[in-house]
Amino acid sequence: MLEVLILEDNDLQRQAYRQIIQQRIEINDTPKAYDMEIAVCTPEPKDILNYLNEHPNARVFALLDIQIDHSDLNGINVAEKIRAQQPFAAIAFITTHDEMLKLTLSRKVEPLDFIYKEEGAENADQLIREDVDTAYERYQKDTRNSEVMFSYEVARDRFRELKFSDLYYVESLKDAPRKLLLRGRDVRAEFRGELRQVERDNPNLIRCDRSILINPQNVVIFDFGQRVLYFDRQRKVSCKVSARKVAMLRRYLKGIAEVKQEV
């Protein structure tokens, strides 16, 4: 999960940023909410530093006001701590002090964005939404590049693992309560579980039907005329798509899968 850290000493602005980010997490251009949460929203730089000390492995997107009037610490100090702990963290500054840009560069904190409050709330709000999107896209790419495993229970207290990159889909079996079917590259297995829990545990899976979760990165062909997803060029592994999911999947898979209209 990507954790969001917000530092802003103006109460009204801080709550406004929180609302904008939360709405973007929940409503965006993908089929589901981002796997993100607001972990800290504070006027105190020390709150974020304490969080980083307590969660050294957290993956973060930080929106930081540079000038904190009541504190000896400022947003750049916080950014330096984040950057030292996480070289690839996404950091966006928001400020009234445009002269601070050179300072952020000289301190080598490499900001994702630098938002000027003077350019208006509407402009700032839109840039924050775009920064949330960019930070999450980077997080997803980084997650895909690491070796993520999908774990499933083949018998009571007996688990197996499959590389997430080899997983095609998970389907609930109609005639077997709490039984799921897994299809993957050279794998077909039944295991214990509930589809709803699998969805909660694996936010990169999306529903193409009420009983099927797919790994969208492994979809090769989407025949939206026939409402069928294929996971190999030979079309040996496939699953159906519900009518109400066709439009969403067609948009989401654009650029990932070959999309075909066949009658």
Image (cartoon, rainbow, N blue to C red):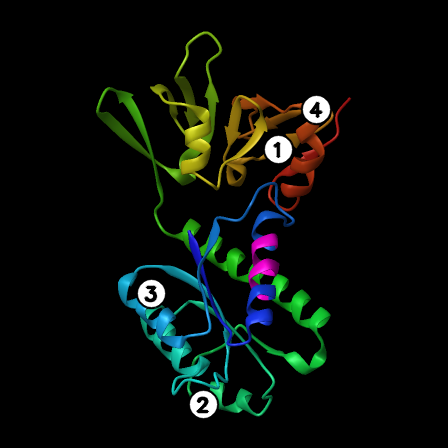
Q: Quadrant of residue 163?
A: top left
Q: Is residue 20 magenta?
A: yes
Q: Which residue is mark 2?
A: 106
- Foreground: disc 1 or disc 2: 2
- Foreground: disc 3 or disc 1: 3
Q: CA distance from mark 4 to mark 3?
A: 45 Å
Say left or right for 109 vs 128: left
Tag shown at residue 243: 4
Asked if the residue at tag 2 contacts the one at tag 3, i.e. Cβ–Cβ closer than 8 Å, the answer is: no
Task: Please tell me whether the stretch drawn in magenta is mainly helix, strand or loop.
Answer: helix
Q: Quadrant of the C terminus?
A: top right
What residue span does the magenta drawing correspond to?
17-23
Q: In terms of sequence position, does the residue under pointer 3 or pointer 2 come before the other?
A: 3
Q: Is residue 83 visible?
A: yes
- Foreground: disc 4 or disc 3: 3
Q: Secondary structure at mark 4?
A: helix
- Foreground: disc 1 or disc 4: 4
- Foreground: disc 3 or disc 2: 3
**Crowding near pointer 3: few (<14 within 10 Å), some, many (20+)?**
some
Q: Secondary structure at mark 1?
A: strand
**Crowding near pointer 4: few (<14 within 10 Å), some, many (20+)?**
few
Asked if the residue at tag 4 contacts the one at tag 2, i.e. Cβ–Cβ closer than 8 Å, the answer is: no
Q: In front: 99, or 88? A: 99
Tag shown at residue 221: 1
Q: In terms of sequence position, does the residue under pointer 4 or pointer 3 come before the other?
A: 3
Which residue appears farthest toward the left when viewing the image?
157
